Image (spheres, rainbow, N blue to C red):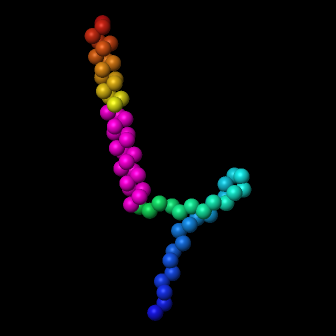
Amino acid sequence: MAEAKKIDTLQNIELAEGVEIRLRPAGALVRGWAFLLDLLFRGIWFLVLSVVTTLFGAFVNASV
């Protein structure tokens, strides 16, 4: 029985300085988790900005 060959996922990339590096792209699961984490951070940031602008608007409106 023939042994299955592994797929090499390493990519060689040459940088502007002439240095060659080898990178392995992330898989779908890792990228999905990263997307969800980014979405969570954006949601928290949006919530904080919403609260700050609401409080600022209430303060400005109360002083008029």
The x, y position of residue 17, in whole percent, is 71, 52
Q: Image quadrant of residue 61?
A: top left
Tell me: 45 left or right of 10: left
Q: Is residue 10 above or below residue 35?
A: below
Residue lying farthest to the right in this orientation: 18
Residue lying farthest to the bottom in this orientation: 1
Q: Main secondary structure of the magenta part?
A: helix
Tell me: 32 left or right of 24: left
Q: Is residue 48 above or below residue 24?
A: above
Q: What are the residue bounds of the magenta stretch?
A: 29-47
Q: Image quadrant of residue 49?
A: top left
Q: Image quadrant of residue 14?
A: bottom right
The x, y position of residue 26, in whole percent, is 47, 60
Q: Is residue 41 above or below residue 53?
A: below
- Picture residue at 34% right of the left edge, 37% below the top: 44
Question: Quick one: quadrant of the C terminus?
Answer: top left
- Picture residue at 37% right of the left edge, 40% below the top: 42
Tally of marks: 0
Instruction: Residue 33: say if magenta.
Output: yes
Instruction: Residue 63: say if magenta.
Output: no
The x, y position of residue 29, in whole percent, is 39, 60
The x, y position of residue 4, in whole percent, is 48, 83
- Picture residue at 41% right of the left edge, 61% below the top: 28
- Picture residue at 37% right of the left edge, 48% below the top: 37
